[in-house]
Image (cartoon, helix red, strand yellow):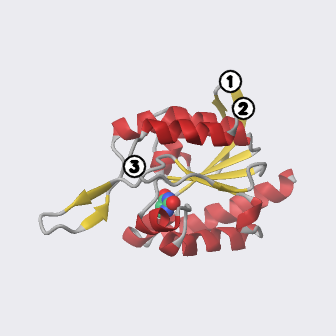
Amino acid sequence: MSLSKLYQEITAFYPGTELVFGDGDAKASLLLIGEAPGRDEVEQKKPFVGKAGKNLNEFLDVLGLRREQIYITNVCKFRPFKVSAKGTVSNRPPTKQEVLQAQDFLHREIGEIAPRMIVTLGNTPLRAVRNDPAATIGAWHGRPEKVMVNARQYHLFALYHPASIIYNPSLKEVYRGDLCALAKWLQKES
Ligand code: URA
């Protein structure tokens, strides 16, 4: 099974839905996993663009990497959204059911990329990668862990989702500290 065949399978699973697949170097040693695309991502058919792309740039700057050197994907390949009474469309977190449905595809995607290191942003990808809906980012962030996905071992480094810093500015320093710890770990390992 190749990555493009897997993406074809996902497309068939969500008929009529606009999807955003992974982007970057499919042979990269670092795989970055976010939660789900937003409006900008659906428009550009690329993960982490627009506002989220700015957060990604900080991530890449600290690690001394370029976007093309890593692979970037999301747990959900579709945009979870809600519509207000006034008709305004906005993002919402994916439901547990939606994450569970996406999880098997994500695990197979991880197997296709076969990275040395998986970096997750926030609770949703942490839970999906670990197959543990009770895992919390507060307990797991900021240090490398070993994780098994489809009988293969990977290093996992969990970060807070940069968007969560907007709602909780006190996390900014924690996020920066975690990023520096990740940079040091990557330097040591390479
Ligand atoms: N954009 C993405 O592609 N993923 C996120 O998790 C957030 C913004």
* Category of crowding for the residue at label 3, using alpha-carbon neighbours closer than 10 angstroms: few (below 14), some (14–19), many (at least 20): few
Spatial distance from mark 1 to mark 2, Cα to Cα?
Answer: 7 Å
Q: Is mark 3 within 8 Å of ligand 1?
A: no
Q: Measure how far apart labels 3 and 2 are at the Cα level.
A: 32 Å
Residue 60's spot in the image, x, y percent? Answer: 69, 69
Quarter of the C terminus within the rendering: bottom right
Give SS at disc 1: loop
- Placement of 10 over or under 186, stated as above or below: above
Q: Nearer the viewer, mark 1 or mark 3?
A: 3
Q: What is the three-letter code of the residue carrying label 1?
A: Ala
Residue sitting farthest toward the top: 151
> Quarter of the image holding residue 159?
bottom right
| Residue at 62% over, 61% down | 178
Q: Residue at x 37, y 69 (%)?
A: 167
Q: Identify residue type, mark 2.
A: Gln
Name the residue carrying label 3: 17
Indicate which disc residue 153 carries.
2
For the N terminus, give its image quadrant.
Answer: top right
Residue 73 coordinates in the image, percent (x, y): 58, 52
Residue that carries the numbered disc 1 in the rendered image: 151
